[in-house]
Image: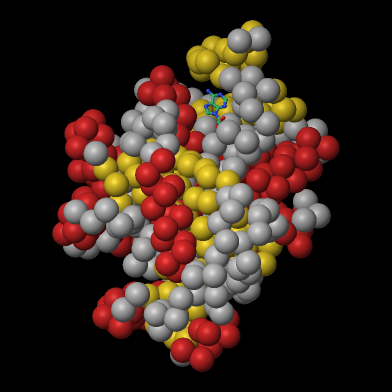
C-alpha cells in the first residue's frame, strides 16, 4: 500500500523534533503544508541530534557492514581499545538485526546500499547549504573537507582502493603528504604519518544550535511545536489520530521521525522496521588548547574530532545497547585516554561527557518511505551515523513522497519495503 498525493494545505504532524524532524517540518512548511511537530523535549535536546560530531560526511557512501565485516568485528570485540562494543545479551536480543547487518556485506546487497547512500551523499552538501541559507544560517556550515588519518602504512594502503572507488562514483579526495599533514592538523601526535583529504565533507558550527535555528525559522513560518510525547497513533476514516497526555488531535498525515523511538510506532502501524540503538560516546572540551581547521577522522580508531563553537569535540565508537541503558562510564575514560594519545597537548579539564543513540538500520540506509500498512503514515528515520548529513536531502525526498512527485525507481532503496 502507498499513500499517494497528500494535497497541499493538508495538516501534517511530525513525531520527533531532532534534526530530521525539524528539517522535515521546515521543508513541508515551505511546500505549503500545515505542519505541527510533537516532542516532549525542546528541539534537538533529547535525541542523538543534541551533541553529535557535527560532520556533514558526504563521501561516506558505504554501509558499515562491508565485505569481510564478521572477521573484523570478531577482532575488534577482542580488543578493549577497539571502537565496537556488544554484550552477548544484546547480541542475542538483536540477533535478527545482526543477521540482516551481516547480509548487507554480501556483494549485491552491499552495492544496493552503496547506491542508495551515494544518491543521498551526492545531494547532501548542496541541500544542507540551501536549507541553511533559507534559515539565514549559512555561516553555520563550513565545507573544507575532512582529513582521514591512518595509524599505519598498511591500513592506509588498504584504504586506497575505496578512495579510488569513491572517486569513480564522483567523490574526490587527495593523498596528503607528511608536511601537509603537519600543517593542516598540527596538534596530532607525530606518530601519524598517513592521511587522505576527502573533499565532499563539511562541518557545522554546533549541531544543537543548528536544530534550534531551523526550528526557530519553522516556528516563525507557522509550524506549531507541541511539547508533548505521542503515546499512540490510530487511523480514523481519512485522518490519523495522535494521542498525547494532553488529548487527541487529528491530522491528514503523520511523519514518524522519532529517531530510535520510531521502532515502536512502526510496530503499532503494522510495519517492520529493523533498527538498533548504536550508541556513541564523546567529550566536548571548552578549552582544549586544540583547534583544527578541518574535521578529522581517525580511521582505525572509530574516533572523530571537530572544533565547534561549544568547544573541541572528540569521540565516536559503536556500542550496540538499548538506548535506555545507562552510559558505560568506562567508555568515557577510554575516550579520554585515547584523546591524550592522539593529541598529546590536549587539556581535558571541564570536559562534558555525552552518550547518544544512533538510530541504525542494518544496511546503514535511512527509511524515507510511506508505510506499507497504514495509509497516510510516512517514515523519515533510521539515519544511523549520518542524520545531520542527510537531514536536508531526506526532507526534500519526503516532500516528494507526500506530493507524489517522487521518482520511485531512484528512491526504492530508501523504502521500508526493502526489509520484507
Ligand atoms: C556520538 C555520535 C556522533 C555522531 N556524529 C554525527 C555526525 O558527525 N554527522 C552526522 O550526520 N550524524 C552524526 N551522528 C548521527 C546523528 O546524530 C543521528 O543520525 C541524528 O541525530 C538522528 O536524528 P533524528 O532526528 O532522526 O533523531 P533524534 O535526534 O534522536 O531525535 C528524535 C526525537 O524524537 C523524539 N521522540 C521519541 N519518541 C517520541 C514520542 N513518543 N513522541 C514524541 N517525540 C518522540 C525524541 O524526544 C527526540 O527528540 C552521530 C551520532 C552519535 C551518537
**Above or below — where is 83 with respect to 289?**
above
Q: How many marks?
A: 0
Q: Position of residue 235 (x, y in %)?
A: 51, 15
User: What residue is drawn where x is 67% and y is 67%?
Assistant: 142
Horizontal and vertical percent for residue 11? 68, 26
Query: Is 327 above or below relative to 400?
Result: above
Q: Residue 173, relative to residue 348: is it above or below?
A: below
Judged left or right of residue 120, residue 267 is: left
Could you say which is closer to the camera, residue 118 or residue 383? 383
Residue sitting nearer the eye, 283 or 122:
283
Looking at this view, is 143 or 356 the one in front? 356
The residue shown at (58%, 33%) is 46
In the rendered image, the vertical position of residue 29 relative to residue 116, given as above or below:
above
- Please name the residue shown 53% across and 45% down the image: 353
Res. 377 visible in picture: yes
Q: Is residue 318 left or right of residue 173?
A: left
Query: Which residue shows up at 44% across the image and 81% down it?
Result: 190
Where residue 284 appears, as percent x and y from the top left, is: 58, 52
Front-most of residues 418 and 160: 160
Quarter of the image where the C terminus is located: top left
Image position of 360 (left or right of 354) = left
Residue 70 appears in the picture as rendered? no
Which colour scheme appears in the figure? secondary structure
Q: Which x, y percent locates residue 148?
A: 45, 73
Q: Quadrant of the N terminus?
A: top left
Picture quadrant of residue 330: top left
Amino acid at each position: 500500500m502507498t499513500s499517494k498525493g497528500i494535497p497541499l494545505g493538508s495538516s501534517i504532524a511530525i513525531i520527533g523534533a531532532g534534526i530530521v524532524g525539524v528539517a522535515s517540518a521546515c521543508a513541508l512548511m515551505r511546500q505549503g503544508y500545515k505542519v505541527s511537530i510533537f516532542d516532549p523535549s525542546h528541539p534537538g535536546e533529547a535525541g542523538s541530534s543534541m551533541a553529535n560530531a557535527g560532520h556533514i560526511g558526504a563521501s561516506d557512501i558505504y554501509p558499515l557492514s562491508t565485505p569481510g565485516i564478521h572477521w573484523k568485528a570478531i577482532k575488534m570485540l577482542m580488543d578493549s581499545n577497539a571502537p565496537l562494543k556488544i554484550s552477548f545479551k544484546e547480541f542475542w536480543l538483536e540477533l535478527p538485526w545482526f543477521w540482516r547487518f551481516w547480509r548487507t556485506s554480501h556483494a549485491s546487497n552491499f552495492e544496493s546500499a552503496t547506491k542508495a547512500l551515494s544518491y543521498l551523499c551526492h545531494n547532501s552538501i548542496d541541500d544542507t547549504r540551501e536549507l541553511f541559507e533559507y534559515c539565514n544560517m549559512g555561516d553555520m556550515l563550513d565545507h573544507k573537507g575532512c582529513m582521514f588519518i591512518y595509524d599505519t602504512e598498511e591500513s592506509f594502503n588498504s584504504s586506497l582502493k575505496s578512495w579510488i572507488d569513491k572517486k569513480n562514483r564522483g567523490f574526490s579526495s587527495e593523498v596528503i603528504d607528511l608536511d601537509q599533514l603537519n600543517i593542516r592538523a598540527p596538534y596530532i601526535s607525530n606518530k601519524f604519518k598517513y592521511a587522505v583529504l576527502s573533499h565532499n565533507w563539511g562541518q557545522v558550527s554546533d549541531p544543537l544550535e543548528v536544530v534550534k535555528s531551523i526550528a526557530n525559522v519553522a516556528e516563525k513560518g507557522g509550524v506549531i511545536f507541541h511539547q508533548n510525547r505521542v503515546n499512540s497513533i490510530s487511523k480514523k476514516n481519512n485522518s490519523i489520530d495522535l494521542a498525547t497526555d494532553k488529548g487527541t488531535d487529528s491530522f491528514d498525515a503523520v511523519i514518524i521521525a522519532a529517531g530510535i523511538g520510531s521502532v515502536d510506532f512502526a510496530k503499532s502501524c503494522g510495519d517492520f522496521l529493523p533498527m538498533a540503538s548504536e550508541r556513541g560516546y564523546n567529550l566536548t572540551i571548552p578549552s582544549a588548547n586544540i583547534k583544527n581547521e578541518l574535521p578529522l577522522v581517525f580511521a582505525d580508531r572509530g574516533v572523530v574530532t571537530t572544533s565547534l563553537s561549544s568547544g573541541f569535540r572528540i569521540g565516536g565508537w559503536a556500542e550496540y545497547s538499548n538506548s535506555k541503558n545507562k552510559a558505560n562510564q568506562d567508555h568515557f575514560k577510554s575516550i579520554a585516554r585515547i584523546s591524550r594519545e592522539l593529541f598529546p597537548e590536549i587539556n581535558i579539564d571541564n570536559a562534558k561527557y555525552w552518550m547518544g543513540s544512533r538510530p541504525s538500520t542494518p544496511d546503514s540506509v535511512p527509511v524515507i518511505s510511506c508505510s506499507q500498512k497504514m495509509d497516510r503514515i510516512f517514515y523519515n528515520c533510521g539515519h544511523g551515523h549520518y542524520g545531520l548529513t542527510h537531514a536536508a536531502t531526506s526532507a526534500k525526498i519526503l516532500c516528494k513522497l507526500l506530493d507524489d512527485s517522487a521518482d520511485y525507481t531512484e528512491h526504492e532503496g530508501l523504502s521500508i519495503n526493502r526489509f520484507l
